[in-house]
Amino acid sequence: MQTMTPEATRLLIARFDQLKPESPALWGKMNAGQMIRHLLDSFALAMGERTASEKSSWAERKILKHIALRLLTEWPRNVKTRPEMDQQLHGTPPGEFHRDIQELKAVMLIFANPQRNFRFGRHPVFMELSEWEWMRWGWMHANHHLKQFGL
């Protein structure tokens, strides 16, 4: 199962290098700039720098988490996100595309670095995640949105 190892992160970054501001989404409502900001907000949450409303059932915390992180190789399209991570609601608005994408790549390298200088936050649905689960989530989330843009 792929996780955000430093090498896997470099491969994800190479795919992000192909993204353009005008790249069309194959599904969903976000444009390329909103997707980059969505990922930045999400990594900030994972790294304990941001919070989102927490609401989940026991089944979501246990069964859905297991399915999403351990059984699936890709996530389904058009999964609803928390309003704080939705750039069309309360998420951080996109800035200048090239600056935002450089910031995302830097954050991903920090996130994937085994010598972390941050503490993981809480996932708004899955709650507490292990280090491996966060690394799996990070790779799955980035890969999901790259595929959203055909990359």
Image (tube, rainbow, N blue to C red):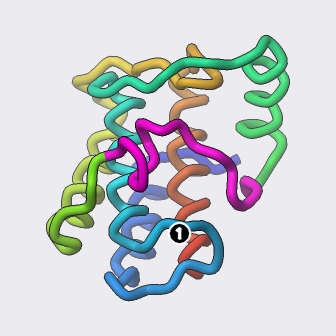
For the residue pair 91 and 59, the one nearer the viewer reads as 91
Give the answer, above or below, for where 140 lies relative to 48.
below
In the rendered structure, the answer to whether residue 15 lies left or right of residue 93 reads: right
- From the top left corner, tell me how far across and down residue 33 is, in percent: 33, 69
Answer whether residue 9 is magenta in the image.
no
For the residue pair 141 and 53, the one nearer the viewer reads as 53
Residue 91, by quadrant, is: top left
- From the top left corner, tell me how far across and down residue 73 is, in percent: 76, 54
Residue at x 48% of width, y 18% of height: 122
- For label 1, the crowd category at 10 Å Cα-Cα, with few meaning under 14, some 14 to 19 and many 20 or more, is many
Residue at x 34% of width, y 84% of height: 20
- From the top left corner, tell me how far across and down residue 69 is, in percent: 71, 37
Secondary structure of the residue carrying numbered label 1: helix
**Label 1, on which residue?**
146
In the rendered structure, the answer to whether residue 60 lies left or right of residue 103 reads: right
Residue at x 45% of width, y 67% of height: 11
In the rendered structure, the answer to whether residue 61 lies left or right of residue 119 reads: right
The magenta segment: 74-91
Residue at x 77% of width, y 37% of height: 70
In the rendered structure, the answer to whether residue 120 lies left or right of residue 140 reads: left
For the residue pair 41 and 10, the one nearer the viewer reads as 41
Answer whether residue 79 is magenta in the image.
yes
- From the top left corner, tell me how far across and down residue 80 is, in percent: 65, 46
Q: Please state which amino acid type lies under the numbered disc 1.
A: Leu
The total of numbered circles placed on residues is: 1
